Image: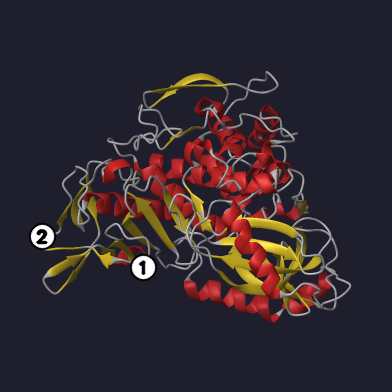
Amino acid sequence: MSPLYARHKRTSLAIATAVAAGALLATGLTTSASAQTPAGAAATPLAAAPTTLSAAARTTLIQQAQAGATETAQQIGLGTQEKLVVKDVVKDVDGTVHTRYERTYAGLPVLGGDLIVHSKSGKTQGVTRANKSAIKVASLTPRVTAAKAAQQAVSAAKTLGSAKTAADGARKVIWAGSGKPVLAYETVVGGLQDDGTPNRLHVITDATTGKKLFEYQGIENATGTGKSLYSGTVSLTTTLSGSTYQLSDATRGSHKTYNLAHKTSGKGTLFTDADNVWGTGSASSSSTDQTAAVDAAYGAQETWDFYKSTFNRSGIKNNGVGAYSRVHYGSSYVNAFWDDSCFCMTYGDGEGNVNPLTSLDVAGHEMSHGVTSNTAGLEYSGESGGLNEATSDIFGTGVEFFANNSNDVGDYLIGEEIDINGDGTPLRYMDKPSKDGGSADYWSSTVGNKDVHYSSGVANHFFYLLAEGSGSKTINGVTYNSPTSNGSTVTGIGRAKALQIWYKALTTYMTSTTNYKAARTATLSAASALYGSTSTEYKAVAAAWSAVNVA
């Protein structure tokens, strides 16, 4: 689970505190020259930009890749007991295909063994690996029982403050997320976290020694007329069923908005209305209040359109299927979260049930967790967890600028509308993250020990510098003053190009174990592919990373 923020700067949600900062491997990255745009043709991201694939075309590419998986495994040097399973396919305008694979060893899932094969005209151009070590274990017979592993996982969840915890059993896996692969168990613990957020704690246990190897949360923090709380009066696409309108958007993958009525489980009840005019523009503690639903539905609508318009991505999974949203979660629940297991977004109503966490950038943030889960799958711990959170802040900011809503103008502040701090300040600042009192402006060897909401500051700062540059400036009435760790002056390339680079890096070059050093490599590879290795954009990426001490 990835809630929007860590409450009261506690580390109960910071799985990173249980993992050494250097535990995650840098991504092994190989990029071929043929995947790069010639230096003289680097003005716009055309050849290496993702092309729009119909559902049928995407399915065909996946089927073809799976049919040739055995041959691909041999070509890239995998062992005889390893098999590839296609997860996703991205095709660029120039015909380059990026196929994302999970893999198995002797029939067991290899966690942290994901990889991306880059090919063109049927020939492999390079491979990006989450783990460069050979996948091989001495024995497939565990010395620790599954029951003991499950019991230890429940204890780990309780230590983090979880309540009503229960394990769904332990499955045998190969753990390759932190160095030499080992036989292990993966246990998923349910129940609730200490603040009422649902729990999906994944605990990896060494099947030989019983030692806990890793843990992360699987819950990632969250046409009618709608009168919203944060965005003014907005248009909503709805569905007429008989004489009743439903808050269901058939034009965007059938996204639906449900009312949990202050419960913490189930899907809830679909919002309906008689006149297709939704909400009042004011928050109410009533469990039937439509205003929060308006903001949630509007946020889902704008996020869908942002991804479609900006990246040619059709929905969170890029398969044309919409997620669903749930509002009025719990009582006075001050958070929002994305849950990949239900493919849904959930919003609390805040203090007194009158401050719903349904603003535009929060909606974009939560759904972007789903995009990350279905692409790079950045583990929600350590530096990769910080990159996961930053990705949601980056794209949530992109959604806010894209919507161009005069009531909630685009800015580089996160959660400025929901007033979680109670003093009018935003939750996070991208130009100088440390202004929130906990986030890191620059990389250090201990940044991975921070809660992921604070280690994300390094990537947020990088993105701001890449888009807008260093120093003082005012954008949409907000004044920023972004420093650099090395005293350099960074010139931004604009938000549009910065977004393209981050998205391509996420979907083409990052893996589950990508850390900050590997993120620099991934974004440089993306900039090279989009704009050329001698381009201004490429040099700006390098300069922005150096400015946040990622060299």
Relative to 304, say whether 541 is above or below: above
Q: Secondary structure at mark 2?
A: loop
x, y percent for residue 77: 85, 69
Query: Residue at 62% across / 24% down in the picture?
Result: 490
Q: Residues within 10 Å of mark 2 (few under 14, many from 20)?
A: few
x, y percent for residue 208: 82, 69
Query: Residue at 36% across / 54% down in the picture?
Result: 300
Quadrant of the drawing holding the C terminus: top right
* Identity, as a three-letter code, of the amino acid under mark 2: Asp
Q: Earlier in the sequence, mark 2 or mark 1?
A: 1
x, y percent for residue 418: 35, 38
Quarter of the image where one finds residue 415: top left
Residue 275: assigned label? 2
* Identity, as a three-letter code, of the amino acid under mark 1: Gly
Direction from residue 9 to residue 324 in the image, left or right: left
Query: Residue at 78% across / 78% down in the picture?
Result: 71
Using the image as rendered, state which of residue 416 and residue 174 is in the foreground.
174
x, y percent for residue 529: 67, 49
Query: Residue at 11% across / 63% down in the picture?
Result: 274
Residue 266: assigned label? 1
Q: Secondary structure at mark 1?
A: loop
Relative to 139, say whether 285 is above or below: above
Q: Residues within 10 Å of mark 1 (few under 14, many from 20)?
A: few
Using the image as rendered, state which of residue 109 and residue 240 is in the foreground.
109
CB-based contact (under 8 Å), mark 2 and mark 1: no
Relative to 226, say whether 266 is above or below: below
Relative to 506, say whether 57 is above or below: below
Direction from residue 181 to residue 305 in the image, left or right: left
Quarter of the image where one finds residue 446: top right
Residue 150 can be seen in this image: yes
